[in-house]
């Protein structure tokens, strides 16, 4: 549903979802929904600049892994990746800074980025009540 609102028809992006977060309490689900919206919107906006999708659609993958009292979420794309020598923190826009604050302060979790072979991967670790 989210992809319908954020994907530009000139730059097609497909979304894949693996696993499930399970039932989450409102105090986790609400800030997590805001964080996920920001991360997915950033994938669409920054990972696939105009002219980079000539060979087909870009791909964004969301993977949920629930382990005991933790939820691990991986958001990865096969886009252009982070600029050489730059970190997510050094290029974070206001939306991403707010997302990090929500994860760390509201959810007591972590948000880390790692460049993949292609694209970028964001890992969220959220403790569950």
Image: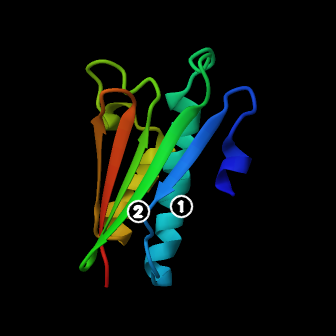
Disc 2: CA contacts within 10 A as few (<14), some (14-19) or many (>=20): some
Q: Position of residue 2 (x, y in %)?
A: 66, 54
Q: Where is residue 41 in the image (x, y as percent from the top left)?
A: 57, 44
Quarter assignment of residue 89: top left
Residue with the most extreme right position: 9
Badge 2 marks a residue whose secondary structure is: helix
Q: Which-is-in-front pick, marks 1 and 2?
A: 1
What residue did someone put label 2 on?
102
Quarter assignment of residue 115: top left
- The numbered dot on residue 8 is none
How many circles with numbers are drawn on the protein? Answer: 2
* Left or right: 98 as drawn, with respect to 11: left
Residue at image position (47%, 82%) is 23
Q: Position of residue 27 (x, y in %)?
A: 46, 80
Residue at image position (63%, 18%) is 50
- Relative vertical location of residue 11 with respect to residue 13 in this rendering, above or below: above
Q: In which quarter of the image is the C terminus?
A: bottom left
Badge 1 marks a residue whose secondary structure is: helix
Residue at image position (37%, 70%) is 106
Residue at image position (31%, 79%) is 128
58 or 120: nearer the eye? 58
CA–CA distance between discs 1 and 2? 9 Å
- Relative vertical location of residue 6 with respect to residue 22 in this rendering, above or below: above
Disc 1: CA contacts within 10 A as few (<14), some (14-19) or many (>=20): some
For the residues labelled 1 and 2, say whether their Cβ atoms are less than 8 Å apart. Answer: yes
Q: Quadrant of the N terminus?
A: bottom right
* Left or right: 99 as drawn, with respect to 12: left
Q: Where is residue 17 in the image (x, y as percent from the top left)?
A: 50, 56
What residue did someone put label 1 on?
34
- Relative vertical location of residue 25 with respect to residue 66 in this rendering, above or below: below
Q: Which of marks 1 and 2 is nearer the N terminus?
A: 1
10 or 106: nearer the eye? 10
């Amino acid at each position: 549903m989210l992809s319908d609102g954020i994907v530009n028809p000139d730059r097609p992006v497909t979304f894949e979802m693996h696993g499930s977060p399970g039932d989450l309490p409102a105090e986790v689900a609400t800030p997590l929904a805001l964080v996920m919206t920001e991360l997915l919107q950033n994938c669409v906006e920054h990972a696939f600049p105009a002219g980079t999708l000539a060979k087909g659609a870009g791909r964004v993958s969301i993977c949920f892994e629930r382990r005991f009292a933790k939820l691990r979420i991986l958001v990865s794309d096969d886009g252009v990746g982070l600029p050489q020598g730059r970190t997510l923190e050094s290029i974070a826009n206001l939306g991403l800074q707010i997302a990090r604050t929500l994860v760390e302060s509201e959810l007591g979790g972590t948000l880390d980025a790692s460049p993949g072979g292609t694209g970028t991967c964001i890992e969220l670790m959220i403790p569950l009540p």
